[in-house]
Image (tube, helix red, strand yellow):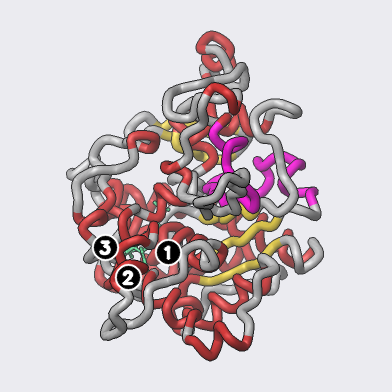
Amino acid sequence: MGSTGDEPIVMAGPVPFVDVVVDNAGGAVANKADPGGVLPQEDEYESIVSSLPSNPKLQLLCYQGKWLLESWVPGIIAIQRPGGGFAPRHGDVVLASLPKCGTTWLKALAFATMARRAHPPPPAAGDDDERRQRHHPLLRLNPHDCVPSMEKLFAAGLGSKMDALPSPRLMATHVHHSLLPASITDNPHCKIIYICRDPKDMIVSLWHFVRRRLPEIPFLELFESACEGRCLSSPIWDHILGYWNASKTSPETTVLFLRYEELLHDPADGVRKLARFVGQPFSPEEEEAGVVEDIVRLCSFEQMKNLEVNKAAGLSPVLQQNAYTNGSFFRKGGTGDWANHMTPEMAERLDAIVEEKLRGSGLSFRS
Ligand code: PAP
């Protein structure tokens, strides 16, 4: 990524966004709030949100028909502004997901794959290339510090930091497809990678996450709100269908639709798909050298969960949220935990609701 000579340094993306500091010559100050005129002013924001339905306990607002974390909404408004918040760039890759459906993992896999020339994934244990092992960004940073979450970044007034990232840029969103600006969804030069997960496991994972802030919240309360289409990022079927339909109707080069369960079953296949999709397929030499397997290992649940950085109590200052730490994003990392929290009747009810909503789409979560 860098250069030791006198020639100008040419950065190739993606780079960990927390490492990017923009000096005044770059026209932006990256490490402190810099609304740059794109965030709504407080009174304007108030006038937009004051009439919205809300769920104060879960800190949600119903914005444009979708239940969203209230802290994201100013960021979403900024991103949606035509000519305002988000300036698309050729080669942008947006990772999209419902919360708790594999976002952290997908961020790691996409970053490791797209940045592999600047940062080769460490080889298997036993190889003694310690320098590479120590220096890979995913060994010192949580994936959320490598790939920015757009609505959180814009809500923190750090949208200008996006402009400072070298291309190709890698970013993420939990926002529904219909809420994204046309500069992303109708842009043939912007690629979207979506990951979905069995909604039952998503709800269980979300409950464990929410309990860090609300230890007393009953599972049933979150389950009911999911069934009614009123929990975080709900309706969840709208979220999934929006990206599913886009993956069917857009040229297949612009939306890649992945499933958490399939990625667990064959992560190497998912990584190869991802690499082809972003226009960086693995060469025969890379295949021969085991680079795909190195990426899978680097990003595996066990590897990431046990890193010091992910055991630490901290979270990037940009994304600081009380009660959540780097470790909050790594819990069990498998499938089927719903059976430990739902009765068969509850599971059937949610499955039936989702099945009905997805009817005719060609997508199903029934096994
Ligand atoms: P986010 O949307 O808040 O970023 P997200 O990463 O999508 O969260 O979801 C966290 C889930 O992914 C957790 O699932 P669980 O609660 O059922 O265990 C977490 O354990 C799982 N997860 C995180 N990293 C990995 C990984 N490397 N491989 C597989 N699963 C992972």
Residue labelled 3 has its Cβ within 8 Å of some atom of ligand 1: yes
Q: What element does badge 3 sit on?
A: loop
In the image, residue 192 sits, relative to residue 279, either above or below, namely above
Q: Which residue position is annotated with label 1? A: 105
Residue 62: x %, y % from top left: 53, 34
Measured Cα–Cα span from mark 2 to mark 3: 9 Å
How busy is the neighbourhood of tag 3: few (under 14 within 10 Å), some, or many (20 plus)?
Answer: few
User: Where does the image place residue 299, in percent across and percent down from the top left?
Assistant: 39, 69
Quarter of the image where ligand 1 sits: bottom left
Which secondary structure, mark 2? helix
Q: Mark 2 highlights which residue?
A: 301
Q: Are marks 1 and 2 in contact (CB under 8 Å)?
A: yes
Judging by the rendered image, the residue that carries numbered circle 3 is: 331
Disc 2 marks which amino acid? Phe
Q: Who's the residue at 54% across and 77% down the image?
A: 270
Q: Residues within 10 Å of mark 1 (few under 14, many from 20)?
A: many
Q: Is residue 187 left or right of residue 343?
A: right
The residue lying furthest to the top in this view is 43
Q: Is mark 2 within 8 Å of ligand 1?
A: yes
As measured in the structure, the alpha-carbon distance from the residue carrying label 1 to the one carrying label 3 is 12 Å
Residue 344, above or below 88: below
- Of badges 1 and 3, the one in the foreground is 1
- For image coordinates 66% across by 34% down, the residue present is 86
Horizontal and vertical percent for residue 20? Answer: 47, 40
Cβ at disc 1 under 8 Å from ligand 1: yes
Any part of residue 53 in sight: no
